[in-house]
Image (spheres, helix red, strand yellow):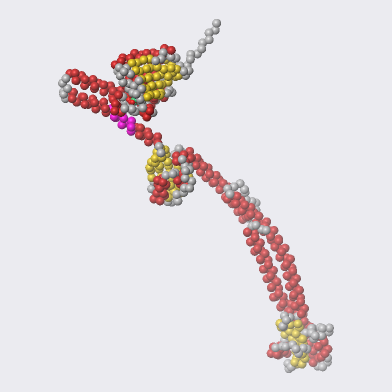
Amino acid sequence: MIRSALLRRIYAVILLALVVTAGCTWLLFMLMSRSLFVNIRANEMLPRARSLSAIVNAYMEGRFDENLLLRLVDVNEKDTSIMNAYLIVADREGTISLVSDEKQTLDPQKLENQISEILSGRTVVSVLKSIGGVDIVTLGVPVYDDGGAISGALLLYVPQYETLAARSALAGALAMAMGIVVPIVFLLIYALVYQMIAPLRQMRDVALRMADGSFDTRADESVNGEVGQLGSSLNRLSKALKHNISELTFERNRLVQILNGLSEGIAAVDRIGNITHINPALEHLFQAGGCPENPRMNVIPREEVWAAFDQAINSGEGAHFTLSEGERNISCAISPVHDDKGGIAGAVGLFRDITSEVRLENTRREYVANVSHEMRTPLTAMRGLIEPLRDGMVKDENARKRYYDIILREILRLSRLINDLMELSRLQSGTLAIEPENFEIAEIVYDLYERYWTTCEEHGLTLALTADFEKFPLLFSNPDRVEQLLVILLDNAIKYTPSGGHIELGGEWDDERATLRVKDSGLGIAPEHIDHIFERFYKVDKAHSGMGSGLGLSIAREMLEQMGEKIWVTSKVGEGSEFCFTVKRAAPPPMIIENE
Ligand code: ADP
């Protein structure tokens, strides 16, 4: 079975051509052979007819017996006849004197014409088609007397039985020859065509492999002529395609890598809004996969985003907005994508998590508002005092002195606030040098104890040291900063402990660190505030804002974080608070081994 459709068609055409050629040849033979054979026979018999005319002349002069003549000529006299013909003899006047077979019906008019033609000295040769398909050759020759004058006419009708048989036999032989030749020729052509078409089949295989993405197979270029040229063109095409495809693949991979490497989420859609590309950042941003029945919502589960995509595709208008996803804020920028002709080919969306930026912006705003607020309070107070002083409205010397005291306190408070702000900003920008060194904590603690003992007494508080700081190991940190931290905590303890309470300064150590504790029996801090007191400007009791700026603990935490240390608090409302922070111990001195 031939699988190639082209080969099948070629073979069918060749077979048809061969069969038609054989058929036509046979038909032409049948048509042409008839007249050819009959003419040959007629020419062959004509001399015999001329010879016979001498015998007929003898018969007409009574010198030859009629029966003998008929036995020589008549078709019915099979054994003796030399002509196998029907015979008609006419005299000089054209009167028929002898007919061999009366049953033969002849057209009298035609017969008369032929006789008069023969009597005029011409020879008649024609073919009659008799019933039954046997051709009859008509031969007419004049009969001459001994003086050479035309004495009559001899007409011979010779049935061509042999010719018919010979033609049939030849036709049969021809048919048989064709029956043998056609298959042989067909087989030869089959083999030839198969061989000729082999390079084309190989090229088809190469083209199919190219379509499957394999460009390593080569077409046969060795064949001469157009087929070889076609093969080399195909090979050139394959090489060019391979080169272009590998370049395109490289470019596409690079683009995909860039898109996948972006921290921003990207989604692209085509002209009808189907998603064509998303990157891992987008999947992470929207936690994709929650809606498998809807591919778009499965990727970005927000209707407003897809409405913006549709708008970009339909009207060419981009959109920029911010989405709130739980605690997060996502900035979305959706723009149409244009093709070479300026039409809209789709849309692309860029998604960025701006939660920290929004938080930072809010913090900044809060910070500015807090700073303004903290500054306005003492300024308003001072203004309220300076104006009556300027206008000379405060006459009493004691009152004036009290006014000046308050103004001075507010100025000190303001400068404390500004100092704290600057300290915090230096800490946060990393410009505050915190150089560590080995130091004894006892020195700092005793110094502070002395300084704060009087202040505590003024506030009706008692201050006690609950640890033997002399025994503390050597610490490794910045002593000034450690003192500053203790000052912040002691100041707070004094601020938030009502008169009659007591404050304790204690601590302990382990192999790595020492922990310093400032404990008071003051107001305490409610659990809902505990997590916030280390934030900037956070105050538990905002009504008593005069007690502090809300920056002390945030400075403390920031400083300790930079030193790699921790601060924490335990507190109970109405019972007091305990603030603790860690300080690293100094490395043990190297052992000195004395040689004796
Ligand atoms: P402030 O200058 O207001 O004291 P801090 O940052 O030092 O600012 O303290 C933040 C808040 O923490 C205070 O406003 C106060 O409400 C609370 N707080 C701090 N220390 C204590 C303490 N020892 N006892 C009770 N509350 C305290």
Indicate left or right for 369 with 470 as reference. left
Q: Main secondary structure of the magenta part?
A: helix
232 or 200: nearer the eye?
200
Question: Magenta segment: does it hold 369?
Answer: yes
Q: Residue 160: percent from the left, percent from the top? A: 75, 80
Magenta-highlighted residues: 365-375
Q: Nearer the viewer, residue 490 or 150?
A: 490
Q: Is residue 100 left or right of residue 213?
A: right
Q: Residue at x 29, y 26 (%)?
A: 544
Task: Find residue 432 and report its image quarter.
Answer: top left
Residue 438 belongs to magenta span: no
Where is residue 51? Give x, y as percent.
80, 85
Report the number of discs. Answer: 0
As drawn, 272 above or below 596: below
**Foreground pick, 432 / 246:** 432
Residue 148 appears in the rendering: no
| Quarter residue 127 falls in | bottom right
Residue displayed at 30% across by 24% down: 547
Where residue 219 sits: x, y (%)? 62, 50
Q: Quadrant of the N terminus?
A: bottom right
Tell me the quarter of the image containing the C terminus: top right
Residue 336 appears at what percent x and percent y?
A: 41, 47
Please identify the residue farthest to the top as the structure is shown: 596
Where 39 sits versus 565, above or below? below
Location of residue 195 with respect to 550 vertically, above or below: below
Quadrant assignment, res 129 = bottom right
Q: Quadrant of ligand 1?
A: top left
Q: Residue at x 73, y 70 (%)?
A: 175
Residue visible at 71% across and 65% down? 182
Asked whether the viewer can see residue 458, the reply is: yes
Query: Image height check: is 459 above or below 100?
Result: above
